């Protein structure tokens, strides 16, 4: 399957302006969504993305999505950790190491020279406003858009301190309204949760209910259930997911797409890039299901 940037206009192909939402590793589902749209005969003529949506959209616009897909599908847990450059200034992670790795893997380009319209959405944290990045180096725009506050260090660009676009526009439909495409399609990573929490799940594993120390010293006695307390980073990402989900619903109600593909917001944790194969397939499946409901076959 060829998920490179589109060829010149094909009159028989309906065109799509595609909004790709924010959501950490869940954003790998965007790859499957793009591949399924292409498989079903749609040509993507414009992309706007926030955070991980900006990254996947930009790589697609460069024509390098297959290269990225092959690379990310080979990542193991420790490979993900090796891409992290820790810091305690402005966030937990500098972010330069992952961006430089991607530049070496894919190259770089100026946004205005890409073969389709591309917008990376970021947030100017000092001026408290949404920023649409449509010119300049692609990976500068991506680095700004993925700068999750307290996790990634903010990115300085043109004298502005920029952070994650999801703070104000998690599924950026607004940059696409001006585009002359046949359909407006959005892929949101903030869909309803589908897995029960430990509090709701009566079949939770002993590891969740009792912990390994309890099992080690229990001598076979019944152990009263105990729910594991989340760590600081887990609590932060869970809180941001909840806020982002509510903001996504408001923005999508105001700027409704022709087709909305929803990925459950509990599909993966923000750092679980080692689950790429599974998440890409989830995006493909959910897009196929949404297309079937939207335009059912006779």
Image (cartoon, grey):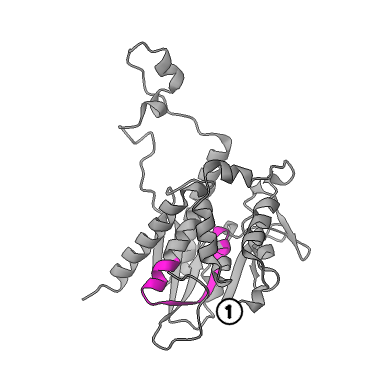
In front of the other: 210 or 63: 63
- Is residue 221 found inside the magenta-colored segment of the image? no
Q: Return the x and y of residue 17 as percentages of the image width and height.
A: 48, 75
- Is residue 46 found inside the magenta-colored segment of the image? yes
Q: Return the x and y of residue 276 as percentages of the image width and height.
A: 47, 52
Q: Secondary structure at mark 1?
A: loop
Q: Quadrant of the N terminus?
A: bottom left
Q: Return the x and y of residue 123 as percentages of the image width and height.
A: 65, 60
In front of the other: 220 or 78: 78
Q: Residue at x 58, y 79 (%)?
A: 115
Task: Please name the residue that numbered disc 1 is placed on.
Answer: 115
Q: Residue at x 55, y 65 (%)?
A: 49
Q: Residue at x 42, y 49 (%)?
A: 267
In front of the other: 62 or 201: 62
Give the residues drawn in magenta, as a range: 34-55
Q: Return the x and y of residue 114 as percentages of the image width and height.
A: 61, 76
Q: Is residue 274 above or below residue 100?
A: above
């Amino acid at each position: 399957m060829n998920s490179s940037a589109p060829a010149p206009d094909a009159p028989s192909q309906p065109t799509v302006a595609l909004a790709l939402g924010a959501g950490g590793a869940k954003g790998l589902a965007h790859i499957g969504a793009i591949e399924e749209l292409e498989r079903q005969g749609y040509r993507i003529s414009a992309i706007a993305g926030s955070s991980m949506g900006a990254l996947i959209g930009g790589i697609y616009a460069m024509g390098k999505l297959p290269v990225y897909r092959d690379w990310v599908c080979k990542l193991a847990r420790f490979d993900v950790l090796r891409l992290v450059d820790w810091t305690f200034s402005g966030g937990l992670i500098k972010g330069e190491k992952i961006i430089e790795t991607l530049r070496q893997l894919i190259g770089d380009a100026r946004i205005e020279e890409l073969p389709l319209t591309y917008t990376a959405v970021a947030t100017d944290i000092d001026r408290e406003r949404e920023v649409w990045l449509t010119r300049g180096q692609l990976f500068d725009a991506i680095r700004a858009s993925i700068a999750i506050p307290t996790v990634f260090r903010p990115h300085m660009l043109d004298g502005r301190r920029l952070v994650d676009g999801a703070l104000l526009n998690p599924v950026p439909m607004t940059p696409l309204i001006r585009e002359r495409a046949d359909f407006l399609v959005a892929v949101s990573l903030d869909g309803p949760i589908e897995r029960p929490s430990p509090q709701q799940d009566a079949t939770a594993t002993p590891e969740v209910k009792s912990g390994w120390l309890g099992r080690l010293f229990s001598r076979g006695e019944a152990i009263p259930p105990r729910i594991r307390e989340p760590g600081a980073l887990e609590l932060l990402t869970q809180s941001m997911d909840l806020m982002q989900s509510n903001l996504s619903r408001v923005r999508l109600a105001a700027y409704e797409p022709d087709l909305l593909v929803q990925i459950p917001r509990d599909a993966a944790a923000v750092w679980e890039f080692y689950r790429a194969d599974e998440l890409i397939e989830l995006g493909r499946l959910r897009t196929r299901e949404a297309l079937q409901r939207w335009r059912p076959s006779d």
